[in-house]
Image: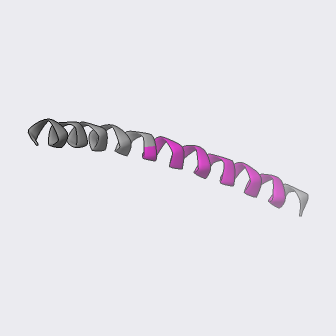
């Protein structure tokens, strides 16, 4: 049971780190498109 809890804790940590990375990768093109849109106004 303790091993299962530790593996679940490691899995949730991995998911949260990857979610941050995905958000960061998506934020860069979004910021570039937003900047291009604002310059085009």
Q: Is residue 27 above or below residue 8?
A: above
The residue at 67%/48% (across/down) is: 13
Q: Is residue 30 left or right of residue 20?
A: left
Q: Using residue 31 as the reference point, say whether residue 7 is left or right of it.
A: right
Nearer to the camera, 25 or 4: 25
Looking at the rendered image, the quarter that the N terminus falls into is bottom right
Colour theme: one colour
Magenta stretch contains residue 31: no
On screen, residue 14 above or below 36: below
Instruction: Give how far across and how far down residue 23 sits, in percent.
Output: 44, 46
In x, y percent, where is residue 16?
Answer: 60, 49
Prevailing SS of the magenta stretch: helix
Magenta range: 4-23
Q: How many marks?
A: 0
Q: Quadrant of residue 17?
A: top right
Q: Where does the image place residue 33, in percent across and percent down from the top left? A: 21, 42
Determine if the magenta segment contains residue 11.
yes
Q: For the C terminus, which image quadrant?
A: top left
Instruction: Name which residue lies at 43% across and 40% down.
Output: 24
- Residue at the front extreme of this rendering: 41
Q: Residue at x 62, y 47 (%)?
A: 14
Residue in front for this viewpoint, 21 or 30: 30
Q: Nearer the viewer, residue 34 or 20?
A: 34
């Amino acid at each position: 049971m303790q091993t299962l809890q530790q593996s679940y804790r490691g899995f949730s940590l991995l998911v949260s780190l990857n979610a941050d990375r995905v958000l960061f990768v998506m934020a860069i093109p979004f910021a570039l498109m937003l900047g291009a849109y604002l310059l085009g106004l």
